[in-house]
Amino acid sequence: MTRREANIPQSSPGITAEDRVALTDTLRRLLTDRSGEADVRRAMETPSGYDAALWQALADMGVAGLVIEESYGGVGAGPMELELVMEETGAALLCAPLLSTVLAAGLLQALGDEAAKRRLLPMIAKGATVATVALAGEQAGGAKRALEITVDYAKTRAQFGRLIGSFQAIKHMAANLLLESESAISAARAAAKALADHSPGAPAAISLAAFACADAFSQVTADAIQMHGGIAFTWAHPAHLYLRRARADAQLLGAPAHYRERFLAELGA
């Protein structure tokens, strides 16, 4: 097993570690080519807020139908594959209705309304129908990418004749942010595995991941702004885009304090 495969959660019957590596590699290449910073900025300015051609390309590779059962035209993957996809799309700041689509598809399947599933799920899987609702993995991926951008900057930006990455204060901040980022990824993947395995501890794991990822994304992006200095406050720099996404996710997905209370309640139960 390669080092990369060792980081891929193991689960979802019929889907191997190699399948997950192939999925994330293919998705990363697509997002690198078509969801760079300039692409994100262009999509943000459109009336729909996303690139319809890119969304269709994602649907064609199975992302829109990732958690939809194969009998309805989907891939039939599980929460662990979804979590990995959300890491990649969060890192790329993907402008697309992915969050709402995957959760809406999951809710439709859980409702058990066969007529609704036959009518809606194949269209969702093909990318022809955009569904609404929202989900969390995106925050972990976004935090990781924001940290990578900041570390790269610290390695090249010089002040007072020294690279800022050599300053003790910057080193300490970067170390703390690395801990936040890695903890969020671990929590998100553990929650996905618990859910895929139908573990009785899944509700607690999900609540833990919810507040860990939200805290990490907010903390990493806010500190990334400070570590960049004034340039990060300008529209031309991508750091503030990650901060904006972190704040939007916090409003959309719920306050970390709420999930902490749920986590403690689950432990008590």
Image (cartoon, helix red, strand yellow):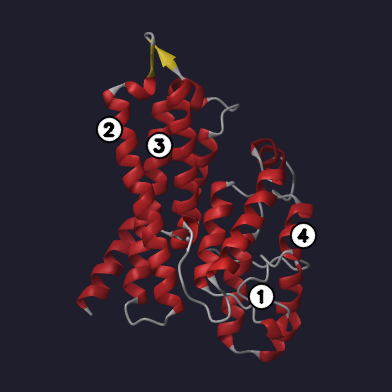
Badge nearest the viewer, 2 or 3: 2
Q: Are the residues at dot 1 and dot 2 in contact (C-beta closer than 8 Å)?
A: no
Mark pair 1, 3: CA separation? 37 Å
- Residue 187, x across and y down, in percent: 36, 61
Which of the 4 image quadrants contains residue 256? bottom left
Q: Secondary structure at mark 4?
A: helix
User: Which disc is residue 222 wearing?
Assistant: 3
- Residue that numbered label 1 is attached to: 75
- Residue that numbered label 4 is attached to: 56
Dot 4 or dot 1: first in sequence order is: 4
Count of residue discs: 4
Amino acid identity at mark 2: His
Mark pair 3, 4: CA separation? 33 Å
- Residue 207, x across and y down, in percent: 35, 67
- Residue that numbered label 2 is attached to: 172
Q: Secondary structure at mark 2?
A: helix
Q: Are the residues at dot 4 and dot 2 in contact (C-beta closer than 8 Å)?
A: no
Dot 1 or dot 2: first in sequence order is: 1
- Residue 156, x across and y down, in percent: 47, 21
Badge nearest the viewer, 4 or 2: 2
